[in-house]
Image (cartoon, rainbow, N blue to C red):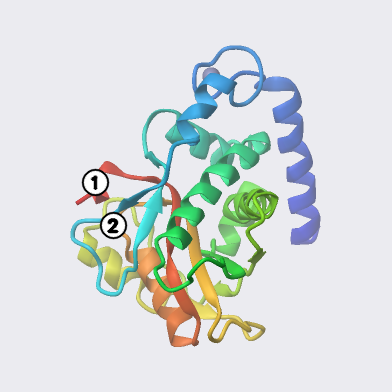
Amino acid sequence: MHAPEMCAARDFNAAAVDLLAAADCVGCHRPGPALCPACATELEALPHRTQPSPCPVGLPSVFAVAEYDGVARSALIAHKEQARLALAKPLGRALALSVFGVVAAQQDFGVGLPLVHLVPVPSRRRSVIERGHDPLLRMTKECAKALKAASIGTTVQPVLAVARQVRDQAGLSAQERADNVGGAFALKRRCRLVGQPVVVVDDIVTTGVTASEACRVLSGGGAHVLGVAVVAATARGRG
Ligand SMILES: [Zn+2]
């Protein structure tokens, strides 16, 4: 079976999980939708600027809507690891709030908002196949839909690729993470973002070294990186 067919088959199974087996809220575990209206409010907060400590050199401003705790953590894990695909929409909306935070913080746009290009931090192809889906890309597409619904012109540009394998970041110090991800990403050949406003998007920010590396590669390719938008920031990374 080719990889895309495998992805499609797993996607189908994951959708079945959403429909049948796990019909409860990931936040409060009450029967009902994957995220009940009460728990969803925790992902609908105003975006706030967050900064890892220590802050990696070259990391632009980072906006999040939640701490990586409670409902946000449960929803991100259930979406990523258990393929609760119905969570892509509320998580995408949360990401859209953070993107808006990044864009609104810019001083040089005057009254008009530019067309914003969203660049997800790339996932390892192996992880995508193992999980049966690409959680961040799915969230980013929902994020773009939410921004377009708010009349903010947006495109999704998955132009970063994993250039080499990195170690699992868990348990590494900030310096070890920086060394681990250095040179990990490369621009795809079809990237056409020279001079274009770009927001790097990810699910969470911890030390910021991964996002920083993504920004470095995009800036090196001529893109105008406005900042980084995430759903949640870990307490460890807050400064
Ligand atoms: Zn709930």
Secondary structure at badge 1 equals helix
Amino acid at dot 1: Arg
Q: Residue 95: where, in percent of width, then height? A: 52, 49
Label 1 sits on residue = 236
On screen, 30 above or below 179?
above
Residue at image position (28%, 72%) is 179
Residue at image position (52%, 71%) is 198
Give the Cα distance between marks 1 and 2: 8 Å
Residue at image position (45%, 52%) is 230
Q: Residue 28: where, in percent of width, then height? A: 50, 17
Query: Based on the displayed image, in which of its 4 quarters is residue 226 positioned?
Result: bottom left
Residue 203 is at least partly visible in this image: no
The image quadrant where one finds the N terminus is bottom right
- Which numbered disc covers residue 89? none
State the count of labels. Answer: 2
Amino acid at dot 2: Thr
Residue 226 is at least partly visible in this image: yes
Q: Nearer the viewer, residue 84 or 98?
A: 98
Is label 1 in contact with label 2 (beta carbons under 8 Å)?
yes
> Of callouts 1 and 2, which one flags the residue occurring earlier in the amino acid sequence?
2
Secondary structure at badge 2 equals loop
Q: Residue 103: where, in percent of width, then height? A: 47, 62
On screen, 175 above or below 14?
below
Query: Based on the displayed image, in which of its 4 quarters is residue 128 positioned?
Result: bottom right
> Local crowd at mark 2 within 10 Å, few (<14), some, or many (≥20)?
many
Query: Based on the displayed image, in which of its 4 quarters is residue 167 positioned?
Result: bottom left
Label 2 sits on residue = 207
Q: Residue 206: where, in percent of width, then height? A: 32, 52
